[in-house]
Image (cartoon, coloured by chain):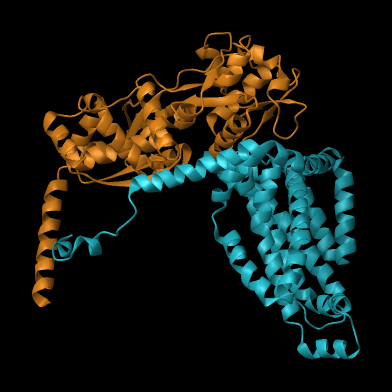
């Protein structure tokens, strides 16, 4: 028994030393695992590559846009947010970059995020005359409100998100209330997703705010409606995205910038990892495929990240050096 | 790590069912549930429609009546209930403070919701509590269910509730009642079980029927505990209102959620204190009312 214990201690000791030697070049990294699917998968992909390819020790921290950003900004914790929709935190982020607290590394989504008002595809097929938001507003009966079927509903984005303001302003600009619609507050991402799932299971109409890349859009086919006008950035910044803007005009959603944001201390201590973060990006088509696989197979974020690394090597091997790619492949 | 080199693998790595099988099981349960929603969704909607109307009507009544009228009715109820000048003045002051910081409408929405949730919890809870008190077998069966209701994270049953009922007040009400009804049931059960055996023997000796015993002996003597149950139910309903906002219930909870998402410290506290204010009004009034009902006894709760 004594011998066994001794050899165990020896082995554990050796293992720890070896581990320390490996991690010396990168150290401990905390990555924010946001609570929506695409960001969660991205966090796990980063974790896998950084741990197996660069020998970092990665800890994942559950997060959400605002709290995670506030914590990174004030406390420099966590080190990195792989998928931050920067429009929501534009002003404080710019200030933090200027003061050198945070670094906006590189876009994670090569095409940016797509936002807008969507309807189910089965409804768009049944009513080919609905091409724009204005067309949809002519048919309040097709989009019954959850609490009062006599009215139409436009489902707003979750409480406290930036899109809640812009959706409310567009609702006002379109005079949707006169058209017999009400703006329904969905409360949370779970409420919004649930309302879509409920509409699809019951085959009723649904109209509201959503964004891509997301698992929901991989799972339920939706059609994005045009607003009939191009995106006017000046108007957007001056009014569409401002709470209680007195006189909003109809406008299209901008393509969202989705960046990886890291703290300054991380950029200094983990140079190797920074090289990787600066070049990695994926497109919405790939993300939607991965998320759809995840949904079909009821996979976790981790499963989906492994699936991506197995199925799309031609994409991620571009991000790292051949040696690192070998290490990652060996670990799969 | 190292110790595993000396042990058979079975003892080191837990022999879990393989991923594929678990995935299949998860999928089939999910698909079964979706099938259920597809086939019975409309029927369920039709059944809860009256509840929806009632909730909408009550909320409209609270929100669109002139504030002064609502305030007068509230103060009257508090006074008639508690017969306590201090509580009545406190109620008036806290409601005025809520109105001043611009939370009147949100508070009305929350008040309507909590009122209905509490009433439903009492209507469901007291009969079940009585049944539990009358039979050990029922108690053994219901207790574990109550444990699940109180400890299961509410987000878990929000998912199926939203799938079935959509979003809005009805699913919110269901989520709140699931959480708020257990203390009502438990304390009703406990109160009746704690009634002195000798008193019951005396009632038997005078030839009371079971119904008379319950109505005239057990319930009055269990009243302090039952009042504590009602009190707990109100508090839990209020606590749950914020979670119910995650599935589209408006009111103070929605503001709290927004404050959390945006790190608005002050907004969060203002709305939080409005909830606390309502909670204290409910609490003190129901306590004072309960004490008045039990003037005959010396047992005084809280």
| Frontmost residue, B95 versus B300 | B300
Residue in the image at 31% along x and 41% along y? A79
The vertical placement of B96 against A225, above or below, is below
| Frontmost residue, A201 versus A215 | A201
The vertical placement of B226 against A182, above or below, is below
Residue in the image at 38% along x and 38% along y? A40
* Total labels drawn: 0
Instruction: Place residue A293 in its image quadrant.
Output: top left
Relative horizontal placement of residue A303, taking residue B48 as reference (left or right): left
Residue B251 x, y percent position in the rendering: 70, 42
The vertical placement of B177 against B297, above or below, is above
| Frontmost residue, B139 versus B82 | B139
| Frontmost residue, B221 versus B112 | B221
Residue A70 seen anywhere in this rendered image of the structure: yes
Residue B251 seen anywhere in this rendered image of the structure: no
Residue B15 x, y percent position in the rendering: 30, 58
Instruction: Place residue A278 in its image quadrant.
Output: top left
The vertical placement of B47 against B12, above or below, is above
Residue in the image at 16% along x and 39% along y? A330
Quadrant (top left/top right/bottom left/bottom right) for the C terminus of chain B: bottom right
Residue B99 x, y percent position in the rendering: 77, 44
Relative horizontal placement of residue B104, taking residue B247 as reference (left or right): right
Residue in the image at 59% along x and 46% along y? B158
Quadrant (top left/top right/bottom left/bottom right) for the N terminus of chain B: bottom left
Relative horizontal placement of residue B23, taking residue B176 as reference (left or right): left
Q: Which chain is cyan?
A: B
Residue A15 x, y percent position in the rendering: 13, 57
Question: In the rendered picture, chain A carries what hue?
Answer: orange
């Amino acid at each position: 028994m004594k011998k066994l214990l001794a050899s165990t201690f020896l082995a554990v000791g050796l293992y720890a030393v070896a581990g320390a030697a490996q991690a010396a070049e990168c150290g401990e990294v905390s990555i924010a695992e946001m609570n929506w699917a695409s960001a969660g998968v991205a966090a796990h992909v980063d974790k896998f590559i950084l741990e197996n390819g660069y020998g970092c020790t990665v800890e994942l921290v559950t997060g959400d846009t605002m709290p995670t950003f506030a914590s990174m900004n004030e406390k420099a914790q966590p080190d990195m947010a792989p998928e931050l929709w920067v429009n929501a935190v534009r002003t404080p982020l710019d200030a933090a970059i200027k003061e050198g607290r945070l670094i906006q590394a590189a876009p994670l989504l090569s095409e940016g995020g797509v936002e807008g008002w969507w309807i189910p595809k089965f409804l768009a097929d049944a009513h080919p005359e609905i091409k724009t938001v204005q067309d949809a507003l002519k048919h309040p009966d097709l989009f019954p409100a959850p609490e009062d079927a006599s009215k139409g509903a436009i489902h707003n984005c979750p409480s406290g998100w930036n899109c809640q303001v812009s959706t409310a302003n567009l609702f006002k600009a379109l005079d949707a209330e006169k058209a017999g619609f009400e703006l329904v507050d969905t409360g949370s991402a779970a409420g919004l997703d649930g309302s879509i799932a409920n509409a699809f299971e019951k085959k009723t109409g649904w109209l509201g705010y959503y964004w891509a890349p997301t698992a929901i859009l991989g799972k339920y086919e939706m059609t994005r409606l045009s607003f009939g006008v191009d995106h006017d950035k000046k108007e957007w910044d001056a009014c569409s995205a401002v709470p209680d803007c007195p006189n909003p005009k109809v406008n299209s959603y901008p393509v969202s910038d989705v960046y990886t944001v890291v703290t300054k201390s991380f950029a200094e201590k983990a140079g190797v990892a920074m090289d990787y973060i600066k070049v990695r990006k994926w497109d919405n088509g790939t993300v939607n495929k991965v998320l759809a696989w995840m949904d079909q197979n009821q996979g976790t974020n981790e499963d989906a990240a492994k699936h991506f690394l197995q199925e799309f090597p031609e994409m991620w091997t571009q991000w790292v050096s051949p040696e690192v790619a070998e290490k990652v492949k060996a670990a799969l | 790590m190292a110790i595993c080199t000396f042990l058979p693998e079975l003892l080191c790595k837990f022999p879990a069912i393989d991923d594929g099988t678990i995935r299949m099981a998860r999928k089939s349960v999910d698909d079964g549930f979706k099938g259920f929603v597809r086939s019975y969704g409309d029927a369920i909607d039709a059944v809860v429609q009256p509840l929806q109307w009632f909730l909408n009507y009550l909320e409209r009544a609270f929100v669109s009546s002139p504030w002064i009228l609502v305030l007068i009715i509230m103060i009257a109820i508090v006074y008639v209930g508690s017969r306590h000048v201090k509580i009545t003045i406190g109620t008036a002051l806290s409601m005025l403070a809520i109105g001043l910081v611009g939370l009147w409408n949100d508070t009305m929405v929350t008040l309507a919701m909590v009122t209905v949730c509490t009433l439903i919890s009492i209507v469901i809870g007291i009969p079940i509590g009585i049944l539990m008190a009358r039979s050990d077998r029922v108690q053994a069966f219901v207790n574990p269910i109550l444990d699940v209701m109180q400890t299961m994270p509410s987000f878990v049953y929000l998912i199926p509730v939203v799938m079935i009922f959509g979003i809005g007040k009805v699913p919110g009400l269901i989520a709140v009642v699931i959480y708020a009804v257990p203390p009502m049931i438990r304390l009703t059960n406990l109160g009746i079980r704690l009634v002195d055996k000798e008193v019951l023997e005396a009632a038997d000796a005078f030839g009371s029927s079971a119904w008379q015993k319950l109505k005239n002996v057990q319930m009055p003597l269990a009243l302090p505990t039952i009042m504590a149950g009602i009190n707990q139910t109100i508090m839990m309903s209020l606590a749950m209102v914020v979670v119910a906002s995650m599935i589209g219930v408006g009111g103070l909870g929605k503001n709290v959620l927004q404050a959390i998402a945006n790190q608005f410290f002050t907004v969060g506290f203002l709305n939080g204190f409005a909830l606390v204010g309502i909670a204290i009004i409910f609490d003190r009034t129901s306590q004072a009312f309960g004490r008045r009902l039990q003037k005959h006894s010396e047992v005084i709760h809280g």
